[in-house]
Amino acid sequence: MLRFVEGRAISGVTISYLEWLCERLALEGKRVLVMVWDNAPWHVSRMVRDWLREHNREALALRRAGKGGVQIVPCWLPSKSPWLNPIEPRWIHGKRAIVEPTSTLTARELESRVCTHFDCEVLDHLTQLSA
């Protein structure tokens, strides 16, 4: 499930994405989300790790109460190891399929091609919340 971001990817946007993702997965009856993650700063920040810990506590409490709840299991990759990340080959093939060698695509054209290639719906962008 892809989402695009207005602005830079930061910890707050990562948390918004994870909340959205867990809501969608809960509606599908899923109980666990396994995330294979690289060491991008917005994946490994203290803010995200603290949120993950609290989210998993809440998800387990919801499940015990019979109300659903999606637990997130992060699988952290070692630094500089793209061959261990199962999504990397898909990104490479996707990039080759959507790139326009003779011109530069606009952001909207790129988004449309990515969503078409990966057969996902075009959704509103996640935004950074201002403090």
Image (cartoon, grey):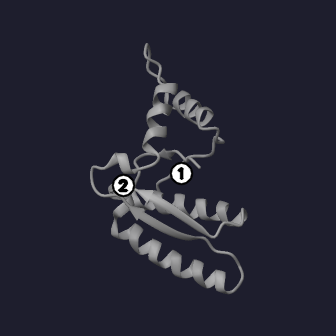
Label 2: which residue? 38
Is label 1 in a helix, a strand or a loop? strand
The structure residue drawn at horizontal position 37% and vertical position 58%, both measured from the top left corner, is 42
Nearer mark to the viewer, of 2 and 1: 2
Is label 2 in a helix, a strand or a loop? loop
59 left or right of 91? right
- In the current view of this chain or complex, which residue is farthest to the top? 102
Asked if residue 125 is positioned above or below residue 115 in the image, the reply reads: below
Crowd class of label 2 (few under 14; some 14 to 19; many from 20; radius 10 Å): many
Residue 19's x, y, as percent? 57, 64
Query: For this rendering, which residue is in front, 91 or 123?
Result: 91
Mark 2–mark 1 Cα distance, whole angstroms, equals 20 Å
Q: Quadrant of residue 67?
A: bottom right
Residue 121's x, y, as percent? 66, 42
Query: For this rendering, which residue is in front, 20 or 119?
Result: 119
- Which circle's residue, 2 or 1, is located before the other in the chain? 2
- In the current view of this chain or complex, which residue is farthest to the left? 80
Which amino acid is tagged 1? Leu
Q: Quadrant of residue 46?
A: bottom left
Asked if residue 115 is positioned above or below residue 15 in the image, the reply reads: above
Crowd class of label 1 (few under 14; some 14 to 19; many from 20; radius 10 Å): some
Residue 22's x, y, as percent? 60, 64
Q: In the rendered image, which quarter contains the C terminus?
A: bottom left
Query: For this rendering, which residue is in front, 99 or 31?
Result: 31
Asked if residue 113 is positioned above or below residue 24 in the image, the reply reads: above
Asked if residue 13 is positioned above or below residue 100 in the image, the reply reads: below
Residue 60's x, y, as percent? 58, 81
- In the current view of this chain or complex, which residue is farthest to the front? 84
Label 1: which residue? 126
The structure residue drawn at horizontal position 45% and vertical position 72%, both measured from the top left corner, is 51
